[in-house]
């Protein structure tokens, strides 16, 4: 919702007398679905959350400061519709700052985004917790938005690192809308460790993303580097989107390298399509990710889905996916388990409601 | 509050261009009270929360989809007004998914309700975390709404199970408004365990509730069954409400059986009354619950309360209650402790404010 | 924001039919900053939250009950903009009820304030979790509002106790606006322990605050006492504010005594100033706190800051501060560490946005 607001003034002299008018938007998504997974070792059926779009609730707002300048904030918490819990964040971009299951259920917190921005003709300065730049190429090209059983097959083992999706303690700069359709961002994040120790830099990282739009085609590339105790990780990826009046094609390629005791790297790709059909849309993707460590564990995935729009806010959806493992990989879908080098399949059937 | 909303569209092709109008209701209750309990072993005085109605804050909304169909969501978090903490949920309907006290204070989460619904002339399909059907007969018939020192005496020991009040991972169907005043629901919930183990079914359960209104009388019965590692639990209950212009009488009867290593069962009843008096109402109840295990622990309770309405939203209230234990039971009120087969009494004195 | 509300009625007879109109204010602050600290042992750089004003989000509202009476509620949760986490509360005003770091990140809860009030010409009765009265003299006189690197130097070691800032389970009474500018409050809080044990009183406490305004000068004093297992704490303080058209001067003096096995006490003071300069304001303070325990650990601090108002809601700010330790004290700024009797310095550079 957008709502008139009487903003709180901080307790400062200049601001003591009056309250400023403002507007805040309350927004969210409640998405819930039956999720079944089947592997060679076991099956599982769950009521799951957010398999079309992650369930969330948030507050955001923008203030015009005059002279082309504006300030804004964005606070967004993920939740699980099936049981009401929130989802953990990572406080220091290291393994020690991440979440483990809490007995009472993880409370709500602004794990998806917690930022304050200053924007002008020169672009946007954004501070706090946010998506990392290199993740945007992954999510924008995946017909399934990296959620649910159809999420693109990306990363294996420790190659994901702790900032493959989001980073806390980040300072980001985004280019303004440029002629020629260029867009881009740089983002640096802190591990917040004490100086003078061998692990002082752990958690620290940065990424750069640059892209452009050429008629119906959008292409962008990203480079990211993060220091971690288990070995620094360098990620590179490229994403492309072709927008046609009656369908959308996407492709992505990624490579991640870790400087662990025994360095290794992984590579993957995705090709996807979204085709509107009547009041709905069909989605499909093929993806693959493999590592050069040991026996070269590799996972191949195919996913097919249909989303039926009941309105602009509400949709029914179903997705079916299957993975094939090789090189010792054991990836299984929707919480099932499968033996090395066997397959696994699963489906989602649910409803997504935006507010 | 009801507020105009600009709904978030999920990142899908069909929805990319426009935002839909919607309305969200922000609602809640802040209830706080002095709570004193006295038993034969010790006394305790607390500032407590929600002894007239559980403190809560939530968001809910409904969208008309046309053709008699509507979609809705309901997210509701309980909190403790006395210290600001939230209240745990249960993620898998088993002992392992329940809450233990968290050092920093349990964060807010949608433990009371977290659902998405699709409704039509055919009824309502509701997915997520919600009251169980058999709980409704308990809460609707209790003049004290199963909160505060006057809450009906129900369940002892392990007979309560984990879904006696709410269930996560549930799929529910509710009958529409029917001629003749019939109402009812069926609800199934998942434990979400891996298949192929002896405990694969734990947490899974279902309940059926059916009732009808005959003039001023409403009667309903419920049956529930849940698989649990400690022994499956079967619960049956019946509730009745008689609505007169100048008072309300209620009655309930319940029976719970557990298939533990040594099976046992419990039975209980409640009779209650609410009588409006001037700007307030007097509430009273007698309840009893006893088990056939061992020495047949049994608890008898009487409760008397008065609620003074300052407005439709705000009330002052006080409740006094006393329990008598027999068969080795040690139930004590408001956090006090009492020796086996002795009594305990307590009172609440507070304010409830709805928003 | 202020918004029309349709209040939830509790499930009582009198309230079954209609919903009452109401209004709720959603309010908050998102404040984020780079925070650097440097000590003789190590340095640290962080993205921090709330160094000009604590980041928060809350709901509050008021209902006119007629006859000069009103009811109100205030629910306010702190959060960390840098990573999205919430902040712990204390459930029993004892060490056991306080927060330790949670692996998944502390969820949001109403740690800053969670109260229900009843107000009339006779004053205000406020129940729940709130600031303690003696803290108000500290915060009102500190140009930096007791947050960020410039926060006044107050308390050392265990002298702070658990209710030096806020108390849960509190019952407070606030004087109404009185002729002559008198103001004041009394507040009692419960530890909620079982009776009949040596620690039955732990966590319990009270405070009294009384002040008055004499033209441009405001003076107030407070006395607080709290029972704690580690030793009861008695705190006394006095604060004074001189408001001139073109600046504000503040001063405070505090003394805290603990009845631990080896009793000791601490004393401190602060002098501060806020001077508007163009679209901003310059802040400065000198503060000192020292204990008579052992070698008499003592900390002296100076802080200088500038806040540049971009609007009534948004400001850029920077603060620099330095501490000097003596008597074995090791206080260091912004997460750095320093050896006994050395100094430490640090700065904040950030943005604060209110909504």
Image (spheres, coloured by chain):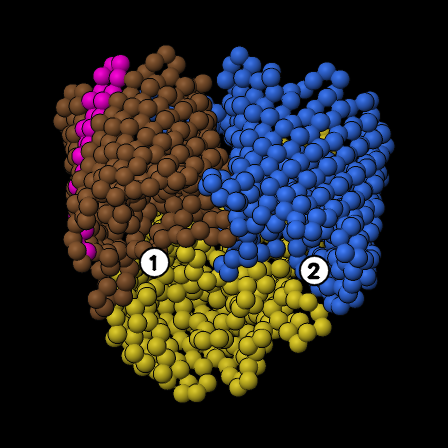
Chain colours: A brown, B blue, C yellow
What are the residue bounds of the magenta stretch? A239-260
Tell me the residue at 36%/26% (across/down): A320
Q: Is mark 1 on a helix, strand or loop?
A: helix
Q: Magenta includes A313?
A: no
Relative image position of residue A127 (x, y in whole percent): 29, 47
In the image shown, does C257 or B297 lie closer to the viewer? Answer: B297
Which chain does tag 2 point to?
B
The Cα–Cα distance between marks 1 and 2, rounded to whole angstroms, is 37 Å
Q: Which chain is disc 1 placed on? A: A
Location of residue B48 by image quarter: bottom right
Question: Residue at image x 70%, y 24%?
Answer: B183
Of residues C129 and A91, which is closer to you in this image?
A91
Q: For residue C208, which quarter of the picture? A: bottom right
Mark 1 on the same chain as mark 2: no
Which circle marks residue A96 in the picture?
1
- Residue A215, placed above or below residue C337: above
């Amino acid at each position: 919702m957008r709502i008139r607001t009487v903003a709180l003034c901080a307790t400062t002299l200049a601001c003591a007398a009056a309250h400023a008018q403002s507007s805040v938007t309350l927004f969210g998504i409640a998405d819930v679905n039956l999720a079944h997974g089947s592997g060679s070792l076991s099956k599982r059926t769950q009521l799951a959350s957010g398999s079309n779009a992650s369930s969330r609730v948030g507050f955001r707002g923008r203030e015009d400061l005059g002279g082309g300048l504006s300030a804004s904030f964005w606070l967004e918490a993920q939740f699980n519709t099936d049981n009401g819990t929130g989802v953990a964040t990572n406080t220091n971009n290291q393994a020690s700052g991440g979440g483990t299951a809490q007995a009472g259920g993880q409370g709500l917190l602004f794990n998806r985004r917690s930022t304050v921005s200053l924007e002008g003709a020169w672009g946007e300065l954004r501070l706090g917790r946010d998506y990392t730049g290199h993740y945007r190429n992954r999510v924008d090209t995946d017909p399934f938005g990296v959620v649910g059983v159809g999420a693109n097959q990306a990363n294996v083992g420790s190659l994901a690192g702790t900032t493959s999706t989001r980073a806390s303690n980040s300072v980001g700069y985004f280019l303004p809308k440029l002629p020629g359709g260029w867009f881009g961002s740089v983002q640096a994040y802190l591990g917040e460790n004490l100086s003078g120790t061998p692990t002082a830099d752990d958690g620290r990282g940065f990424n750069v993303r640059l892209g452009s739009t050429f008629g119906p085609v959008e292409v962008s590339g990203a480079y990211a580097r993060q220091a971690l105790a288990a070995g620094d990780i360098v990620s590179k990826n490229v994403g492309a989107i072709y927008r046609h009046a009656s369908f959308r094609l996407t492709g992505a390629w990624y490579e991640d390298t870790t400087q662990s005791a025994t360095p290794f790297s992984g590579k993957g790709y995705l090709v996807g399509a979204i085709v509107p059909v009547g009041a709905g849309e069909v989605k499909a993707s093929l993806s693959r990710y493999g590592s050069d460590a040991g026996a070269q564990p590799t996972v191949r995935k195919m996913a097919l889905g249909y989303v039926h729009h009941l309105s602009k806010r509400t949709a029914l959806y179903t997705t079916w996916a299957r993975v094939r493992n090789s090189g010792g990989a054991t990836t299984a879908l929707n919480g099932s388990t499968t033996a090395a080098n066997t397959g696994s399949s699963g489906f989602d059937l649910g409803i997504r409601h935006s507010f």
